[in-house]
Amino acid sequence: MNNIELEKKIKELLGIENYFDLVLAIKDFEKEYKTTEFFKVTKRPLEAVVKEAKIHYALQFNDLADKLQKVLDNLSLESVNELLDKMSGVFGKENQEITESLEVLKNLKN
C-alpha cells in the first residue's frame, strides 16, 4: 500500500461518524497498516496517525471551503424561510408575553 492509498484509507476512516465504529475499523485496519512503507519508516501507531490526520485535514482551507459549500448547497430557500418563520413566531410570542407582563406591572403600580 503506497502513501496515496494509505491517505485514501485514512480519509475513509475519518468519514466514520460513530466513534465506536471508528475504533473497530481502526483495529481491523491495523494489521494491514503495519505492512505499509510509511509504518516501517515512521513506526507511528495507527491511532496517532488517525488523530493527527483529523487535525491536519480539518485545518485544510480547501476542504473547509468544500464542506461549507456543501452545507450551503443543501440549504434550500424554503428551509431558510421556514426557519425564519419559526424564529419570528417564537420571538413574537415572547414579545407578546413581555408586553402583557409589563401591562400587569403597570396596572399594579396604578
Image (spheres, grey):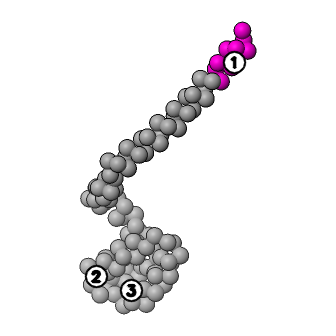
Q: CA distance from mark 2 to mark 1?
A: 70 Å
Coordinates of residue 10 in the picture (x, y in percent): 36, 76
Coordinates of residue 108 in the picture (x, y in percent): 73, 15
Depth check: 60 or 70 in front? 70
- Answer whether residue 109 is magenta in the image: yes
Occupied quadrant, residue 74? bottom left
How many callouts does the rendering have?
3
Per the rendered image, the range of residues in magenta is 101-110
Depth check: 45 or 14 in front? 14
Q: Which residue position is annotated with label 1?
A: 105
Which of the two labelled residues, at mark 3 and mark 2, occupies the earlier sequence position?
2
Q: Which residue position is annotated with label 3?
A: 33
- Answer whether residue 22 is magenta in the image: no
Disc number placed over residue 5 in the picture, else none: 2
In the depicted structure, whether residue 19 falls above or below residue 104: below
Which of the two labelled residues, at mark 1 and mark 3, occupies the earlier sequence position?
3
In the depicted structure, whether residue 103 falls above or below residue 25: above
| Residue 22 visible in the snapshot | yes
User: For the residues carrying marks 2 and 1, which lies nearer the camera in this image?
Assistant: 1
